[in-house]
Amino acid sequence: MNGSVSNTTLLGTYTVNPDCTGTIALSEYDPSGNLLITATLALGWDADMREFRFLFTSAALSDGTALTTVINGDARKR
C-alpha cells in the first residue's frame, strides 16, 4: 500500500455468473484485526476460465472516506 509491503488479511465473498463475470466484496484488516479498507471489484474470466481480470469499482477507508484510485489486474493459469 502506497509503495510499502504490508502483512494484512483479506476477507470477503464473491459471485460468479453464467457469463463468466462476477463481483467481489472484501475487507482488509491489519495484523491486530483493525479494518483498513473495504472494496468491491468487478471480475471477468475468459480463455476457458484460464484468464482472470479484475477492476476495483469502489474502495473506502475504515472511516468511510472514499478512495479515488483505479486498480486493475489480470492473471493467467498455465
Image (cartoon, rainbow, N blue to C red):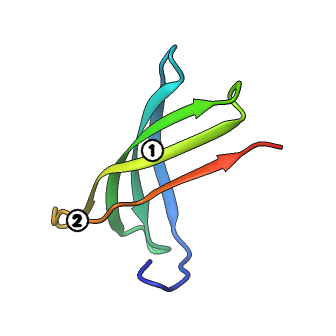
Q: Amino acid at mark 1?
A: Gly
Q: Position of residue 12 (x, y in %)?
A: 45, 44
| Residue pictured at 47% horizontal, 34% vertical | 14
Residue extending farthest to the bottom is 4
Q: Quadrant of residue 24?
A: top left
- In the displayed structure image, the side of residue 69 where residue 24 appears, left or right: right
- SS at badge 2: loop
For the residue carrying disc 1, how many other residues have a C-alpha within 10 Å: few (<14), some (14-19), or many (20+)? few
Tag count in the figure? 2
Residue 19, relative to residue 15: is it above or below?
Answer: above
Q: Name the residue tied to disc 1.
A: 12
Q: Position of residue 29 (x, y in %)?
A: 42, 65
Say which of 45 and 61 sits in front.
Answer: 45
| Residue pictured at 39% horizontal, 54% vertical | 27
Q: Amino acid at mark 2?
A: Thr
Q: Name the residue tied to disc 2.
A: 68
The quadrant the C terminus occupies is top right
Q: Which mark is residue 4?
A: none
Q: CA distance from mark 2 to mark 1?
A: 21 Å
- SS at badge 1: strand
Please tell me whether mark 2 or mark 1 is closer to you in this view: 2
Residue 8, relative to residue 1: is it above or below?
Answer: above
Say which of 46 and 13 sits in front.
Answer: 46
For the residue carrying disc 2, how many other residues have a C-alpha within 10 Å: few (<14), some (14-19), or many (20+)? few
Residue 3, relative to residue 73: is it above or below?
Answer: below
Residue 76, relative to residue 38: is it above or below?
Answer: above
- In the displayed structure image, the side of residue 29 where residue 77 appears, left or right: right
Residue extending farthest to the right is 78
| Residue pictured at 16% horizontal, 66% vertical | 65
Residue extending farthest to the front is 47
| Residue pictured at 45% horizontal, 74% vertical | 32
Q: Quadrant of residue 42?
A: top left
